[in-house]
Amino acid sequence: MKLVIMIPCLNEEKTLPLVLGSIPKKIKGIDKIDILLIDDGCTDRTVEVAKAHGVKHFLTHTRNQGLSRSFRHGLNRALQMGADIIVQTEGDNQYPQERIPDLVQPIIDGTADTVIGDRQTQTIDHFSSSKKFFQKFGTSVLNLAAGTNVPDAISGFRAYSRKAALQLNPIADYSWATETTIQASHKGHTILSIPIKTNPKTRDSRQFKSSWQHIRKSSVTIIRAFIMYKPYAVFFGIGGILLIAGLIPFIHFIYLTLTVRSPFGAHHLQSLLAGSVLLIASFISFTLGVIADLIRINRSLLEEILELSKRNAFKR
Ligand SMILES: Nc1nc2c(ncn2[C@@H]2O[C@H](COP(=O)(O)OP(=O)(O)O)[C@@H](O)[C@H]2O)c(=O)[nH]1
Ligand SMILES: [Mg+2]
């Protein structure tokens, strides 16, 4: 079995030696460990430092493209390198690389497709109480959307099986972690979590400037994933609410027309107008639901083709 450990880096010369130094040299059940450093437009000495520490595989972005794209490109490169298991960690030494053997064990055993290192965020000292709250809340919303039960949805310390890497297609420019969790669940993958303890903080997160920014961007990802994977739930739900909201004034209008006997309900045109607008909106929502569902079916067919072509392109 071959393990590829991906480290996406944006200027991590200071902390990279700690990361590389804590990656186990040997893991039971793994024959070969390769490190893939993703240079996401580094302008410091990250690449030199990596070479000096023996890293041989590099994926270079000539300019910064962000963590999600780095992850996507990294997955493909790791598949090309013949990985059976792919681990992602970070260049800021936030995660305990010495736990990689535990992270990959369920994949070696064939009992999981994705394994997430659960940071046990409620116990992290340097997390403020608001950060802990949003972390908990965000994870609950994601679990609801994805139909999962993961304790730490945005942990960046994960292991993927080759099958998972072939089938996952993250497309958002943000929140690759949330997105791949939702996709994995919809594809029927087994997602496991193992508790880990993060290392002492080396610097602030550069990804999340504030909790609000994080909530806003993650919400967009979750809504998008809902629309992509469960469009009928979204559009038929909205359509149903609009239908009921439209029928009430409409029936009210008919009732008044029949009982009050003013000429064609002349005094109740507001009800007729409000009812009609809501019913038309409901009809549009149902129609969008049907169209979005057809696109969803198309997407799953395209994903199957993509998987087959990836299997061919990355044949070992
Ligand atoms: N913030 C950020 N990190 C990047 C980018 N490209 C690669 N990375 C790497 O992704 C990892 C995560 O970034 P970090 O700032 O620690 O965010 P965190 O996920 O909130 O801990 C680090 O190893 C970065 O070096 C990028 O465009 N922005
Ligand atoms: Mg980090």
Image (cartoon, grey):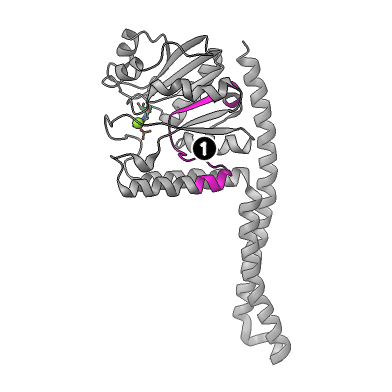
Residue 59 visible? The answer is no
Q: Give the farthest residue toward the right.
A: 258
Neighbour class for label 1 at 10 Å: few (<14), some, many (≥20)? many
> Which quarter of the frame holds ligand 2?
top left
The magenta segment: 141-164
Quarter of the figure with residue 29: top right
Give the camera-side residue of 265 and 114: 114
Give the camera-side residue of 202 and 212: 202
Give the camera-side residue of 218 and 158: 158
Residue 309 inside the magenta-drawn segment: no
Quarter of the image containing the N terminus? top right
Quarter of the figure with residue 57: top left
Quarter of the figure with residue 185: top right
Where residue 152 sits: x, y (%)?
A: 45, 39
Where residue 256 sits: x, y (%)?
A: 68, 86
Q: Could you tell me the amino acid type at mark 1?
A: Glu
Q: Relative to 275, is 90 above or below? A: above
Where residue 21 sits: x, y (%)?
A: 33, 15
Q: Relative to 206, is 246 above or below? A: below
Q: Relative to 135, is 265 above or below? A: below
Q: Residue at x 34, y 20 (%)?
A: 19
Q: Residue at x 57, y 46 (%)?
A: 226
SS type, badge 1: helix
Q: Which residue is mark 1?
A: 179
Q: Residue at x 55, y 48 (%)?
A: 144
Asked if residue 201 lies left or right of residue 254, the reply is left
Asked if residue 116 lies left or right of residue 287, the reply is left
Where residue 54 sits: x, y (%)?
A: 36, 8
Quarter of the image containing the C terminus? top right
